Image (cartoon, rainbow, N blue to C red):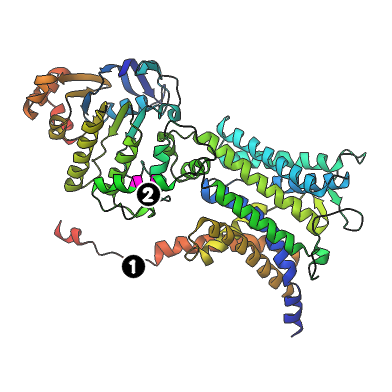
Amino acid sequence: MDFLLSFFNSLPGALGQGLAWGVMAIGVYITYRILDVADLTVDGSLATGGAVAALGITLGLNPWVALLLAVISGMLAGLVTGLLHTACGIPAILSGILTQLALYSINLRIMAIGSGASTKATLALSVDKQSLLLSSRYIREVSFRNPLLLLLVLTAAVIAVLYWFFGTELGCSLRATGANPSMARAQGINTNFAKVLGLVVSNGLVALSGGLLAQYQGSATVDMGRGAIVIGLAAVIIGEVLLGKVFINFALKLLSAIIGAIIYYVVITLVLRLGLESTDLKLLTALVVAVFLTIPYWKGRYFTKTVRKEGVRNA
Amino acid sequence: MLELREVRKTFNPGTINEKRALQGVSLTLADGDFVTVIGGNGAGKSTLLNAVAGVWPVDSGTITIDGIDVTRLPEHKRAQYIGRVFQDPMMGTAATMQIEENLALAARRGRSRGLKAGITAKERSEYRELLRILDLGLEDRLTAKVGLLSGGQRQALTLLMASLVKPKLLLLDEHTAALDPKTAAKVLDATEKIVQRDNLTTLMITHNMRDAIAHGNRLIMMYEGRVAVDVSGEEKKNLTVEQLLSLFSQASGSDEADDKLLLG
């Protein structure tokens, strides 16, 4: 009974984490599912978003402006990865790894701006001293300060904007690039531009998520993005496996990534209550992604009914 | 309409896999020419079409479409002049997108793509009409994913997409080769109709000599990266498979190639 109570007690927290990471999962959905590129920049750009937002707030900027700057910084990171891939001909995965690695150094520098130190690995935020858009402190409060409210509104806005964008001519050219690049080029689509644009949009969203997370948990750290790509993939894949058959509409597909992120954090909360250490989570996340990626593959390979080949007998 | 001058392309130069695919191809197509292209495996037929489409840059020579030098233009920029149908039915369409979305993508070939709607209600009704003419029952399945269609349906759809915005040049790369004979005949029939209707300048590769003779006003045969035979006008109209084979033997200086050509 105690266990159940403490589990239910921690559900709002899981919901908040899930929503904030859900924005990041949508970014991963854009590269992984729409553009068909596994973009590893996100581990770095999430922390960049957190660092820039936290820095802006520390320096006294309006938190919305700080969040906007965070988004722009993520977009720049995506631009670098995109140019490394398209203009320099480096494979997409390696381009992402290079940007991610470089961002580690850059993030340490960003967080030190204005502090006198040359590098800094953590930037603490406090809802008492600074004006933050959201904080996990009010997660169980029934008021407008509850972070779930802002997260729900922002998530809905992100889905709405992306739903509109991917229905435009430009958005359609991105989808075509991911679906069939040679067809896209034959129809006059600059597939290199489309890939860069997709990476820019995706990393902008990832940085937005980082900026929200830094405020939500009260600090930006240089390693807050470590393993983010795997968490994002976990959210996308869990959402697809559970809801892929029901959610056909594009907006619902984006929503399923958010729901996937929430489920992921509920499960994480559950296993933490069961006695696992938080340092075990990376192993657990990797296992979840490996299992959920394996299921559809094995289903197709080992569990399909063999079609009888009529022609073979007559041949 | 199309002019190739001394076009050369070598794949994997300087390696053991070096392949001199185009060895100085010169070819001029007049406005409205419907040229069928035949030749054995590795003769350079597909390479010729890919060179025109700009899939990769050529080593030397120039390619001009309607007076515009496109030799250095990337593939997506040349697309404004060119409609293409590929051999592989999977190549010409986006499987995970709807029929109407594929058509809408094709309707914007050669135009800049901005933040206007990717497809409008007016377009939808136009596409329904166009698909009705195709007579494959696709007019009621506008929102179906193209991945659900058969190879023949996909090729017919790709053909429609290639001609949706009238191209200066239509490139057909063995577009019926992967289809069963009945479907192939249907797609070829649709091709003939569209080419006649819009008076399209067309290059069509085929592996079938009878098709090559039956369609178009001109026939070229490729051999070892060059145009070996080029017949047009009355001579083309009265051509038989036997004559074609002997023409080829003369050009290549060997009879052995007959089988290779027929089978290839």
**Type of amino acid at the residue the image marks with label 1:** Lys
Q: Residues within 10 Å of mark 1 (few under 14, many from 20)?
A: few
SS state under label 2: helix
Residue holding disc 2: B99
Query: What is the number of the mark on residue B255?
Result: none
In which quadrant of the rendered image does the N terminus of chain B lie? top left
Is A174 placed left or right of B31 in the picture? right
At x 50%, y 44%, the residue is B117
CB under 8 Å between callouts 2 and 1? no
At x 40%, y 30%, the residue is B79
Vertical side of A42 occupied by A259: above or below: below
Residue holding disc 1: A305
Q: Quadrant of residue A6?
A: bottom right
In which quadrant of the rendered image does the C terminus of chain B lie? top left
**Type of amino acid at the residue the image marks with label 2:** Ile
Residue B94 image position (x, y, % from top left): 41, 46
Say which chain tag 2 marks. Answer: B
Residue A135 image position (x, y, % from top left): 81, 60
Stretch of the chain drawn in magenta: B123-127
Residue A162 image position (x, y, % from top left): 58, 50
At x 21%, y 30%, the residue is B40
Task: Decide whether the magenta segment is chiefly helix, strand or loop.
Answer: helix
Judge if badges 2 and 1 mark residues of a common chain.
Answer: no
Vertical side of A234 occupied by B106: above or below: above
Alpha carbons under labels 2 and 1: distance apart: 30 Å
Nearer to me, B197 or A94: B197
